[in-house]
Image (cartoon, rainbow, N blue to C red):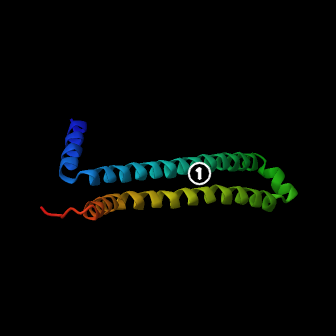
């Protein structure tokens, strides 16, 4: 039923605004495409983060299992540095993903304003007058 409402809404919008409604639809299409690109990049960052997390957990498990040998040979700091380097890589991908996620949220929060502004500006640009 929602699809039917959307179709009738678009038809009515075209009836009232003409080509300006097509411009609005194009803007929506472009914004969806950009959002899909951002979402894919976020997904790739999370995949890389998971790879580094697995690497860190394997090393941490090995350290826990061989803790006596590490303490005996005084290698605690060496392995701690290795774990921290992997952890830093892991969190760099988390940071990148979260920045893109914030951009995505901001992007979709402003979408309605952008679409409305561009559609109405084009409507005015083509010589029509806005009235209720």
Q: In terms of image quadrants, where is residue 117? A: bottom left
| Mark 1 burial class by Cα count in 10 Å: few <14, some 14-19, many 20+ | many
Q: 1 and 116: which one is in front?
A: 116
Quarter of the picture containing the N terminus is: top left
Residue at horizontal 76%, vertical 61%? Answer: 81
Give the mark count. 1
Looking at the image, the residue that sits furthest to the left is 132
How far across and down, in percent of the image, does residue 65 sit?
Answer: 75, 45
Quarter of the picture containing the C terminus is: bottom left
Residue at horizontal 85%, vertical 60%? Answer: 74
Looking at the image, the residue that sits furthest to the right is 73
Relative to 39, 68 lies left or right? right
Looking at the image, the residue that sits furthest to the front is 127
How far across and down, in percent of the image, does residue 98 sit?
Answer: 51, 58
Relative to 101, 47 lies left or right? right
How far across and down, in percent of the image, does residue 43 sit?
Answer: 54, 47
Q: Please tell me whether mark 1 sits on a helix, a strand or a loop.
A: helix
Residue at horizontal 14%, vertical 63%? Answer: 131
Residue at horizontal 32%, vertical 61%? Answer: 118
Q: 37 and 13: which one is in front?
A: 13
Relative to 2, 71 lies left or right? right
Q: Which residue is mark 1?
A: 45
How far across and down, in percent of the image, does residue 88 sit?
Answer: 67, 60
Q: 88 and 77: which one is in front?
A: 88
Q: Is residue 129 above or below residue 12?
A: below
């Amino acid at each position: 039923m929602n699809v039917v409402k959307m179709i009738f809404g678009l038809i009515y919008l075209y009836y009232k605004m003409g080509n300006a409604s097509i411009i609005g639809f194009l803007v929506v299409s472009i914004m969806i495409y950009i959002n899909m690109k951002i979402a894919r990049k976020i997904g790739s960052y999370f995949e890389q983060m998971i790879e580094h997390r697995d690497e860190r957990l394997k090393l941490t498990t090995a350290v826990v299992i061989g803790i006596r040998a590490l303490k005996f040979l005084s290698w605690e700091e060496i392995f701690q540095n290795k774990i921290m380097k992997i952890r830093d890589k892991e969190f760099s991908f988390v940071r990148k993903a979260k920045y893109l996620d914030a951009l995505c949220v901001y992007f979709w929060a402003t979408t309605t304003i952008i679409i409305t502004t561009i559609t109405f500006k084009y409507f005015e640009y083509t010589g029509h007058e806005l009235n209720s």
